[in-house]
Image (tube, rainbow, N blue to C red):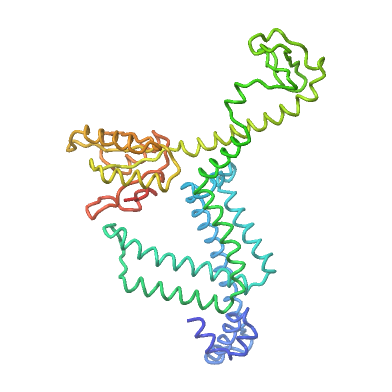
Amino acid sequence: LLSLISFAALPIDVITANKDTVLAGTAKVIGHWIKKSLNFPEHWEVGELLSFWVSIDAFVVLAGAVLTAYVGINGLIRRMAMDRCLPQVLLWKNSVTNTDSLILFGFFALCVSQVILLDCDVEALGGVYCYAFLSVMSIFAFGNMILKVKRPSLPRLHKTSWLASIAGFLSVVTALLGNILGKPELLTYFFVYFIVIGVLVLSMFNRVNILRVILFVLREMGVEEEAWEKEPETLGGIAATRSPKWWWNRGAATQVSTSPSAAENPDETIDLETAGLLAKASPKKDQTSKRRSCFKSVVATLSSVRDVPFIFFAKHDDLYVINKAVLYVQKNEQTSKLIIVHCKSEKSGDTQTLSEHVKLIDVLYPKIKVSLLVVEGAFGIGMIEWLAQELAIPINAMFITCPDKDFTMKIQELRGMRIIT
């Protein structure tokens, strides 16, 4: 509507020459027209007043858009970090303001880098934003069509027909292709940020495999935790052992033994400094200590990633559904623990068969520890929050099957619980 009003009020050449202030110029022309039409006094600057008002309104709208961008990116990045798609350090909160400062300052740095990279070219910045916006809109339309196929029974407040979904998807893709063909040089900047963020997300999805590769490399280098703890160091044919009272570090009196049975007779020792070997021993020991520390750190990180448990709510004793849940977790989640939770009510039968099935699943999938937890009570938001507190498991690490039309809760009441089957 504003574009049509601008075309009606201003000539094309004026719009082209003043493309950064078109709305203000349109408001000024319309103000002068209103002044003449209503016979306002000559000293009333209606055009200038209306132009100023439109400028202030545009500033407020843009300020709101910036604020909305920060709110949106904060929620998106925080949810992705909670789902372990991005580093957990992004969940750190500022103790003073209770805000996600790392996310906010990171987004600010990202925006500033774009301004610097594009040399403050507003038109180029708008083009990159257009690529990102239209890409997201196309993903929304495509995701809606996937939900129609994969989750046909999912309760929805609003439903869109196949015709509307396909038409919307094709319209957005057409607009995206038009912008790409109009300014193909901006694709380079778009893909720079796309690849950087994509590599970060992919590395988080594959961090277990990356850590295993690092452990393999360390083992090939001879860095094995048990080997460092059990094998005595040898320095020029002299076996060095640690006395219970002494440690191998700078300033400490370390002892060595020239006897072949040094490990069995720690008392047969001589002072290392006296033997003149301290200068040769320390660099090697420092290097091996760093390697051991690196090995232990990688093992601890791998254990911390894999030891995060997940929950799957099993409504019935259905071996097929439980097997699908385990397959999903094994394929998509980097964990070694899965808890099958069954909410037992008065109408529920014996859970002995369910227990046997869970034991069978646990045997069939040795890489995942599958256990059963039977709780008394009905499934609901109260039960979900109670389990999250008692087991110290976030709600976004809980799964359920796809609800049907008889499901009493609304999807938004699940507090971020994921639907996987």
Residue 281 on image: x %, y %: 75, 24
Residue plotted at (31% across, 38% down): 361
Q: Is residue 165 placed above or below 73 in the rendered structure?
A: below
User: Could you say which quadrant of the image residue 278 lies in?
Assistant: top right
Image height of 64 relative to 58, above or below: above
Q: Along the line of sight, which residue is nearer the eye, 289 or 267? A: 267
Q: Horizontally, is 397 left or right of 93 in the view?
A: left
Q: Nearer the viewer, residue 112 or 50?
A: 112
Q: Nearer the viewer, residue 253 or 44?
A: 253
Q: Position of residue 70 (x, y in %)?
A: 55, 58
Q: Residue at x 27, y 46 (%)?
A: 321
Q: Is residue 400 above or below residue 373?
A: below
Question: In the displayed structure, does residue 308 sit left or right of residue 123?
Answer: left
In which image quadrant can residue 340 be found?
top left
Number of dots carrying numbers: 0
**Residue closest to the eye, 265 or 70:** 265
Q: Percent x, y for residue 144?
A: 36, 64
Side (left or right) of 418 relative to 187: left
Is residue 96 positioned above or below 231 on the image?
A: below
- Counting from the top left corner in percent of width and height, residue 336 is at 42, 38
Name the image quarter holding residue 392: top left
